[in-house]
Image (cartoon, rainbow, N blue to C red):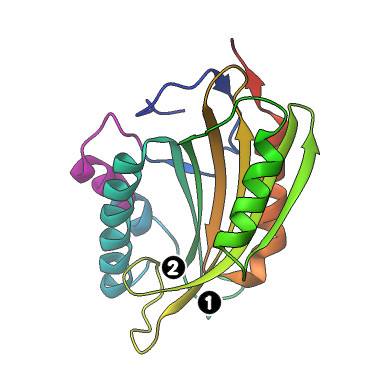
Amino acid sequence: MPTATVDLPLSFDVPEVFRDIDFALSAKDNTDKLVDELISLDPRPTDEQIAHAVLAQQSMYEMLSAAGAVYAGILLYGPTKENPKAKFSSIMLTVTARPSELSNENTVGRLARTMGAIYPEAEVGVVHMTTGPAVLLTEETKVPKPVNLLTDDTKATTVRQLHVFVPIPGRLAMADFSIATENTAEWDTCIDIVGQVCKSIRFTD
């Protein structure tokens, strides 16, 4: 896992298929790594698709750095020899430190009620994990270019996100485990991925 921008007393495992965004590197160095990965794909993305991917990652790098990201990784997929007409798309996995007003058994219930009021169109619920209760939030948002790898500039893209807010014991903080993709047909895969990551959470304090 790359160097984090914020220290949290927990660890977790990420599937090896994700390419880490390393916050110890500059935005340029991370972009160079992305370009090297893209041009090695077979079939190779077009120059337009590569340009979209570069702009998207630069925007995400700046946003995540400012937000206090603990981890960020990208899984790219698209055309294959078996399915050459498939579009390029991505899955973004992030872990971000979030402040919390409470650090007790009331944290999760209060957060779920607050999230439900703030995001009335989202699905909000509580799940019980091995680490304790956590808040789930699933929502779809329309986002402008260039936040994804698709090249159709005629309309905004729908991105589906799942957040798992995990309270940090003994701290007024939560870890936001989030996964997002513009390829909603692969949503079940996204749910499985974030589920695997959350099952691996270990508190270190």
> Left or right: 100 with respect to 22?
right
Above-or-below relation of 74 to 176 = below
Above-or-below relation of 188 to 2 = below
Q: Residue at x 54, y 76 (%)?
A: 86
Name the residue that disc number 2 marks: 43
Q: Nearer the viewer, residue 169 or 146?
A: 169
> Left or right: 128 with respect to 203?
right
The residue type indicated by label 1 comes to: Pro
Q: Are marks 2 and 1 in contact (CB under 8 Å)?
A: yes
For the C terminus, the image quarter is: top right
Marks 2/1: CA–CA distance: 8 Å
> Left or right: 128 with respect to 153?
right
Q: Residue at x 29, y 42 (%)?
A: 66
Q: Secondary structure at mark 2?
A: loop
Residue 199 place in picture, x, y as percent? 73, 33
Mark 2 crowd level (few <14, some 14–19, many ≥20, 10 Å Cα) = few
Which residues fall within the magenta stretch? 22-34
Q: Nearer the viewer, residue 171 or 193?
A: 171
Main secondary structure of the magenta stretch: helix
The residue type indicated by label 2 comes to: Pro
Q: Residue at x 26, y 53 (%)?
A: 58
Q: Quadrant of residue 59?
A: bottom left
- Give the numbered dot on residue 84: 1
Q: Secondary structure at mark 1?
A: loop
Residue 19 place in picture, x, y as percent? 45, 43
> Left or right: 122 with respect to 192?
left
Above-or-below relation of 61 to 48 = above
